[in-house]
């Protein structure tokens, strides 16, 4: 980033915003920069993050709303005489550093800004390494929750409905027992590909368990849209899969949670959708050797490839 500035944004309660408007990091940052510094009130943060890049968020005044964006930007919390428990909580919530107001004008402040950026980079790489399902390449539940948290934070300013679908897949364990782990992994991958092909590029498909997938519909007009997409996905998974020259079928149970009707927090929505999927009767797999459930679904083969 030697040819551009790192973007530093100071934020906190509205009444204190004016006090930080004049804060400017050194232009060159003593070799750690250069830095481009700006300020906004806490209630202006989400549109600001959506409109312009931010590398470091410097949070003043004890405002805790920064936690919702800690997965995306480096955070330094500025506080007068914080307790040990406060510091531990902030660090566990994702802050990269904690500073006193006086330290913002010290010579080593540019170094601390750059260190926070690099810590966030390492954290993001590490999170990504453990956030992807090996067989499907899809994000895991933790990454889905982070993505939903960011979207819901933006929706606080511009409310819009969205829905989370959870599809519980039956037939993977039978495939494992019958054909082995490689075939079961291939079947999971083919299920994931079919789900991904059935939704828009802006929607998110995630692996949320050994036998479950989630689909986040980031923007819908009405709850009926989620039902329509759910029926479409159930239909696509009702067609057989060809794995190693063998026709395999799965049975699928669907659960749907709608925002904001069924909850306003990511974990709440995921729990509701997963609970509904767990209690719903799976349909499909009638007439196949790996069948457990009942329900007739017409067959259509994939190409014979892994």
Image: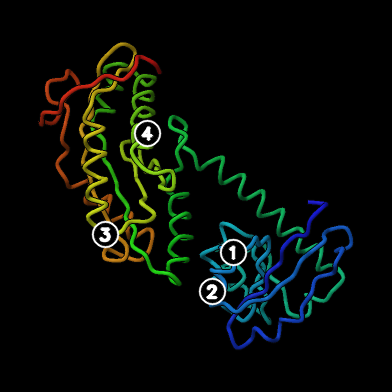
Q: Residues within 10 Å of mark 3 (few under 14, many from 20)?
A: few
Q: Position of residue 188 (x, y in %)?
A: 35, 29
- Give the residue number, with chain letter if any, for mark 2: 64
Give neighbour class at mark 2: few <14, some 14-19, many 20+ (Cα, 10 Å). Answer: some
Q: Secondary structure at mark 4?
A: helix
Q: Quadrant of the C terminus?
A: top left
* Rendered residue at 26%/51% (across/down): 226
On screen, residue 250 above or below 22: above
Tag 4 residue = 192
Q: Decide: is 21 above or below 96.
A: below
Residue 51 numbered mark, or none: 1
Give the foreground label among 2 and 1: 1
The mark closer to the camera, 2 or 4, is 4
Nearest to N terminus: mark 1 or mark 4: 1
Q: At 72% across and 81% down in the image, what residue appears?
A: 21
Q: Which element carries disc 2, helix, strand or loop?
A: loop
Of label 3 and label 2, which has the lower sequence position?
2
Q: Say the numbered circle drawn on residue 222.
A: 3
């Amino acid at each position: 980033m030697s040819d551009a500035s790192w973007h530093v944004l100071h934020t906190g309660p509205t009444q204190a915003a004016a006090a930080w408007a004049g804060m400017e990091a050194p232009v060159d940052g003593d070799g750690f920069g250069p830095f481009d510094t700006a300020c906004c009130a806490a209630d202006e943060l989400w549109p600001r993050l959506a409109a312009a890049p931010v590398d470091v968020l410097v949070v003043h005044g004890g405002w805790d709303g920064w936690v919702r964006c800690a997965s995306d930007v480096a955070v330094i919390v500025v506080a007068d005489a914080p307790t040990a428990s406060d510091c531990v909580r902030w660090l566990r919530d994702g802050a990269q550093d904690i500073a006193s107001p006086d330290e913002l004008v010290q010579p080593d402040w540019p170094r601390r800004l750059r260190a926070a950026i690099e810590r966030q980079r390492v954290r993001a790489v590490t999170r990504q390494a453990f956030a992807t399902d090996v067989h499907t390449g899809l994000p895991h539940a933790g990454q889905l929750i982070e993505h939903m948290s960011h979207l819901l934070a933006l929706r606080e300013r511009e409310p819009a409905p969205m829905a989370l679908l959870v599809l519980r897949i039956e037939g993977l364990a039978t495939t494992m027992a019958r054909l082995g782990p490689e075939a079961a992994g291939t079947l999971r991958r083919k299920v994931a590909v079919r789900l991904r092909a059935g939704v828009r590029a802006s929607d998110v498909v995630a692996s949320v368990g050994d036998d479950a997938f989630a689909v986040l519909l980031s923007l819908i007009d009405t709850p009926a849209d989620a039902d329509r997409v759910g029926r479409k996905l159930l239909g696509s998974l009702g067609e057989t899969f060809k794995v190693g020259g063998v026709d395999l079928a799965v049975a699928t149970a669907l659960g749907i949670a709608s925002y904001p009707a069924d909850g306003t927090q990511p974990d709440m929505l995921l729990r509701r959708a997963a609970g509904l999927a767990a209690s719903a009767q799976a349909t499909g797999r009638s007439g196949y050797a790996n069948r457990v459930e009942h329900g007739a679904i017409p067959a259509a083969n994939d190409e014979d490839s892994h």
